[in-house]
Structure formats: C-alpha cells, structure tokens
C-alpha cells in the first residue's frame, strides 16, 4: 500500500508538474493512484503561486503584478502543457470538423485562432480575478491561487473516472482514462471541497467557507460541461482535453471567489 501511494505521488508530480520526480511505474494501477493524488500536486503548485504573489507584494508591488505572477507560476510549473491543451482543445472544437479530423488538428504543433482567443480570455480572467483577491489582502489572493490550482487537478481526477473513454489509443489521455473508480473520484472531490471550506472558514469566517466550497463545486461543474462536450465531439478524452479541463476549472474557481 505504501509503495502504491509512493508510485501514485510520483506519477502525479511527474506527469502534472515539471518538478524533478522520476515516474517509476507507468501502468494502470499507478495511473489510478496518481490521478487520485492529483489534487496534492495542485496544492504544491498553488502554494508556489501564492508565494510568488506574496513576495512581490512584500517587495512593494501592487496587486496586479502579484496576480500576474500567481497566474504565471502554474503555467511555468507545468511547462505550459495545460494552457497548450486548452488552446488545442479550443481549436479542435472550433473547427467544426468530424472527430478524426478535429483530433488531427489538435495534434498539430501550431495554435489556431480559436486557441489564441481562448488563451487570451482565460488568462485575462485569471489575472483579473487574482488581482481582485490580492487587492482584498494577501491571504485572499494566496487562498485563491491555492484553491484554483487544487480545483484544476481535482477536475483531472474526475475526468479520469471509469466511464470516460480515451479518444486515442496512445498518449497521456489513454494512459489515465477510466482508471479511477467513480466512487473514489467523487469521494476525493468531496474531501477536497470539505477541507478547502474548513480552511477558508478558519481563516476568513463561515461566509468564505461557503464561498470556497462553492468555488470548488463550480470549478468541477464547468470542467464536467467541457469534458462531456469533448467526449461527444471527439469520442473520448486526450491529453489536450485534460489540459483544457484543468484550465477551465482553475478559471471558474477564481471567478466564483471574486463574486459577491
């Protein structure tokens, strides 16, 4: 059990971040454990993003520059793969082509107009939301950075549940698709939402506990809408779809945190 947990953590950090972690196993069992551990990788990424924003605030920058840093760190720690996946998914969906041709478009190295526009507005939304949170105080900005990163990886846990097929026989999507039992995926989602709400409640009070729980749930809901649409359009998920799902969840979480 301890060995499988270690393999899962290695899988999560080795595939979802650029931290120098060597993936020792690449089988379905390790993939299942890895995707269940994905929120843990998100927490580390989120704390790094929060630290970057906090350091800039301590050095005298305004909330906007802190927000840019907190949006840039997750992109850097994933080598931009999630953003690239979002852009490719947008190009595939926007092409209006049949599944095979849309998947071919997504696999190309260039980014089309749909991808560029989607990246622009998603990054603008993330920076704008983080700026509002940092303007309310460093703790709010830090919590937002952490919650959005965790929600993004939690959405990947749900996207890896049984019943969600792979669109291709190869790649990361095929390696993790359908590996996580649905019950375990939803149990992890409930646990993460509860822990996040508890932490926010301890820091900011009961209203913010509800708001942070709502942010996680809204993030997962938005990610599931995209996931279901991609499964219908492409016949399943790919690594690009996983990236799109993660960025959608992160953005939705931040937007909900600044409402009200």
Image (cartoon, helix red, strand yellow):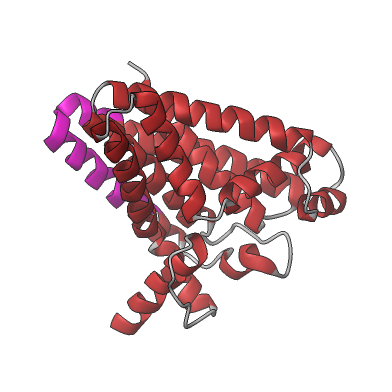
* 103 magenta-colored: no
Q: What residue is drawn where x is 30% and y is 21%?
A: 135
Quarter that holds the C terminus: top left
**Where residue 190 sits in the image (x, y, percent)?**
32, 48
Left or right placement of residue 249 versus residue 141 in this view: right
**Where residue 116 sits in the image (x, y, percent)?**
70, 34
Q: Is residue 38 above or below residue 88?
A: below
Left or right placement of residue 78 versus residue 50 in this view: right
Q: What residue is drawn where x is 59% and y is 63%?
A: 177
* 201 magenta-colored: yes
Residue 1 seen by the camera: no
Q: What residue is drawn where x is 75% and y is 50%?
A: 234
Task: Tell which of 135 and 172 is nearer to you.
Answer: 135
Quarter of the image holding residue 147? top left
Left or right placement of residue 93 versus residue 253 in this view: right
Task: Tell which of 131 and 95 is nearer to you.
Answer: 131
- Magenta stretch: helix, strand or loop mostly: helix
Q: What residue is drawn where x is 33% and y is 52%?
A: 43
**Where residue 103 sits in the image (x, y, percent)?**
79, 53
Q: Magenta segment, which residues?
A: 186-211
Q: Is residue 243 above or below residue 178?
A: above
Residue 230 seen by the camera: yes
**Where residue 32 sits in the image (x, y, percent)?**
47, 70
Quarter that holds the N terminus: bottom left
Residue lying farthest to the top in this orientation: 260
């Amino acid at each position: 059990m301890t060995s499988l947990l270690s393999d899962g953590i290695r899988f999560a950090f080795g595939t979802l971040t650029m931290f120098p972690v060597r993936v020792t196993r690449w089988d379905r069992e390790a993939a299942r454990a890895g995707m269940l551990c994905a929120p843990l990788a998100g927490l580390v990424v989120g704390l790094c993003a929060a630290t970057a924003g906090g350091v800039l605030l301590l050095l005298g920058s305004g909330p906007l520059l802190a927000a840019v840093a907190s949006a840039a760190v997750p992109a850097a720690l994933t080598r931009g793969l999630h953003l690239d996946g979002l852009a490719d998914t947008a190009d595939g969906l926007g092409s209006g082509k049949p599944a095979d041709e849309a998947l071919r478009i997504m696999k190309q190295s260039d980014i089309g107009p749909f991808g560029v526009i989607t990246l622009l507005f998603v990054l603008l939304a993330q920076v704008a939301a983080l700026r509002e949170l940092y303007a309310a105080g460093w703790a709010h900005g830090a919590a937002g950075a952490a919650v959005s990163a965790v929600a993004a990886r939690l959405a990947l846990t749900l996207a890896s549940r049984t019943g969600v097929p792979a669109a291709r026989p190869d790649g990361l999507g095929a390696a993790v698709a359908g590996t996580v039992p649905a019950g375990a995926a939803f149990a992890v989602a409930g646990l993460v939402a509860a822990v996040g709400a508890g932490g926010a409640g301890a820091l900011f009070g009961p209203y913010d506990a509800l708001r942070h729980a709502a942010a996680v749930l809204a993030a997962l809901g938005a990610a599931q809408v995209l996931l279901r649409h991609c499964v219908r359009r492409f016949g399943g998920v790919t690594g690009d779809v996983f990236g799109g799902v993660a960025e959608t969840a992160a953005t939705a979480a931040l937007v909900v945190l600044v409402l009200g």
